[in-house]
């Protein structure tokens, strides 16, 4: 068996320029600025049911989506910001990033940060400006809907994979109706705080947050575009 290792170029355009589904996937972006327009409960429920249509091993459908609003949302944001500002050590329920971070991946991380901060005029050495923008993760970017995503601690890595497909399904469903969303991995940095404020059991591991609502199309930050790896970096063929 021999792997074909010659580089494969990413097409400049989707495989079929007339395929609306492919174009839709290429156009999805993370949204970090929202209008104040509320999201009807019925629409949110439809989006969540669409997300749950994602495949999962043995149809176990792992994960829970917890909407946080009102005083509970304010208390959660304040507690998380306090942890961050007072230097409470981060302690994730699961490993998010590889440790150590390979240089190739570190370069992608830095490039993504540069793309984000450059759209809002925050310079590389502006630590205060960068910190203020990062804080907005814990405010769910002021989105009308704030979700906390959890998974039962007894699930293995496969459960996280299945939940990830449901999370992507939720984001695609939101885009399909003209809404925006942003997954918030930073929420997983202080899982004990999230559980304490929301009264969740220790068995509920904190996976991420989700900000959901109607995008502010005039906000510069929503114009952020991050690059994807060329096809040859993640696709190969193996043949006899």
Image (tube, rainbow, N blue to C red):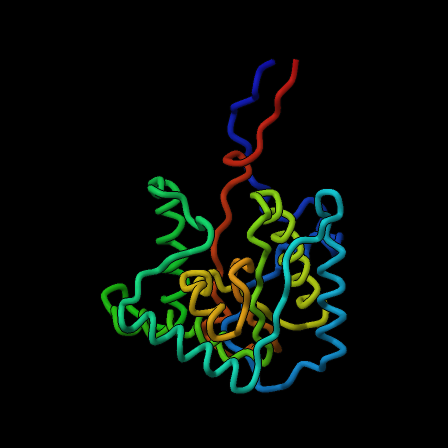
Numbered circles on residues, count: 0
**Residue 37 percent location from the top left of the image:** 62, 86
* Residue sitting nearer the eye, 177 or 137: 137
| Residue ID at (63%, 53%) | 163
Quadrant of the drawing holding the C terminus: top right
Q: Is residue 43 left or right of residue 125?
A: right
**Residue 239 percent location from the top left of the image:** 65, 17
* Residue sitting nearer the eye, 10 or 196: 196
Quadrant of the drawing holding the N terminus: top right
Residue 11 position (above or below residue 140): above
Residue 34 position (above or below residue 158): below
* Residue sitting nearer the eye, 63 or 210: 63
**Residue 223 percent location from the top left of the image:** 50, 68
**Residue 71 percent location from the top left of the image:** 52, 86
Q: Is residue 36 left or right of residue 177?
A: left
| Residue ID at (40%, 73%) | 80
| Residue ID at (46%, 71%) | 196
């Amino acid at each position: 068996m021999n792997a074909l290792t010659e580089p494969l170029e990413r097409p400049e355009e989707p495989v079929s320029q007339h395929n609306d589904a492919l174009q839709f996937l290429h156009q999805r972006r993370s949204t970090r600025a929202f209008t104040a327009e509320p999201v009807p409960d019925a629409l949110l429920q439809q989006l969540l049911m669409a997300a749950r249509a994602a495949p999962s091993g043995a149809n176990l459908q792992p994960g829970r989506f917890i909407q946080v609003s009102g005083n509970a949302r304010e208390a959660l944001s304040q507690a998380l910001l306090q942890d961050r500002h007072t230097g409470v050590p981060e302690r994730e329920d699961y490993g998010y990033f590889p440790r150590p971070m390979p240089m190739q991946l570190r370069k992608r991380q830095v490039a993504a940060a540069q793309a984000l901060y450059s759209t809002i005029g925050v310079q590389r050495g502006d630590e205060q400006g960068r910190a203020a923008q990062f804080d907005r993760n814990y405010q769910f970017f002021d989105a009308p809907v704030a979700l906390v995503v959890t998974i039962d601690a007894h699930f293995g890595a496969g459960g996280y994979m299945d939940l990830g497909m449901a999370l992507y399904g939720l984001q695609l469903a939101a885009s399909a109706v003209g809404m925006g969303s942003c997954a918030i991995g930073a929420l997983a940095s202080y899982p004990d705080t999230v559980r304490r404020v929301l009264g969740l059991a220790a068995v509920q591991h904190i996976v991420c947050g989700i900000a959901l609502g109607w995008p502010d199309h005039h906000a510069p930050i929503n114009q952020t575009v991050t690059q994807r790896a060329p096809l040859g970096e993640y696709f190969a063929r193996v043949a006899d």
